[in-house]
Image (cartoon, rainbow, N blue to C red):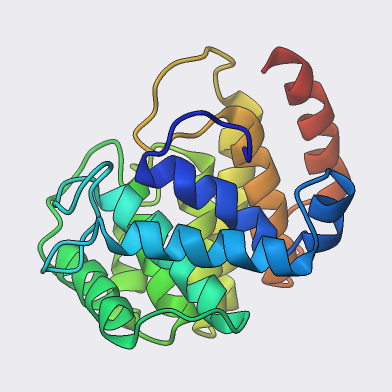
Amino acid sequence: LDRYPYGCTEQVTSGAMPLLYLSSMAQAAGLGEPERIDDKISKAIARIMTRQSSNGAFGLWRAESGEFWLDAYVTDFLSRAKAQGHAVPDLAFTLAMDNLRNRISYAPDFDKGGEDIAYALLVLAREGAANMGDLRYYADTKMENFATPLAVAQLGAALAAYGDPVRADTMFRRAGVMLSVQSNARGWRADFGTPLRDTAAVLKLSAEAGSAALDPVSLVSMMHQGHGRL
């Protein structure tokens, strides 16, 4: 990720996100000492800020609106960076959060999709800014319509964060079923994802939530199997 030659907002975020938690591994990989790694994170935040529009959304290459999933991803990074003590402009972060709330309020109905909605709800929930009615609505009426195991697990994690372990476990179990039957075919996805990432994320999210709905050993086995096909 650090050596990736391009610099759209998704790629900048993907290069900086691991550095928030894996500084020792980053040093071993030759990415620099802690000061240099902190500088990389700060520069990533500054670069991302140049691509935030006045309504709080983020463009891929410039300040504009469009990709809702990207908005959630970048806001997630900023939230995590802020929690780790990195400087994130207060107004920019407030606008980013407001944008997610607004996008949720006006999100269109869907029969297959919802990856952006689920991610935004999780980011909002982690900041204590989600609406419990929204979480329960999507869990109760749209569980079968979410397109990816990641989206289902993200909604489960949001419910767990808001003290609804019963619905959370239901979502995690649904994510497990989806993992077991998902296609191995490659292709472009609106959430930049792969089956391997879905599996890793479901494992992480369910473990963080303290859910016993899924067997971690089975998920790890799926990840080993999936690594070869990706």
Quadrant including the N terminus: top right
Q: Nearer the viewer, residue 126 or 218?
A: 126
Task: Give percent across and percent down for residue 8.
Answer: 36, 39
> Quadrant location of residue 197?
top right
Residue at x 55% of width, y 73% of height: 81
Residue at x 25% of width, y 51% of height: 68
The answer to whether residue 117 shows anywhere in this view is yes
Task: Give percent across and percent down for residue 51.
Answer: 25, 55
> Quadrant location of residue 136?
bottom left
Residue at x 77% of width, y 64% of height: 212
Task: Give percent across and percent down for residue 45.
Answer: 44, 64
Q: Nearer the viewer, residue 99 or 147?
A: 99
Quadrant including the C terminus: top right
> Quadrant location of residue 218?
top right
Q: Nearer the viewer, residue 76 or 138?
A: 76
As drawn, 1 above or below 185 = below
The answer to whether residue 159 shows anywhere in this view is no
As drawn, 99 above or below 7 = below
Q: Nearer the viewer, residue 1 or 214?
A: 1
Residue at x 43% of width, y 79% of height: 88
Is 220 placed left or right of 12 in the picture? right
Count of picture labels: 0
Is 179 placed left or right of 33 in the picture? left
As drawn, 13 above or below 197 = below
Task: Give percent across and percent down for residue 225.
Answer: 80, 22
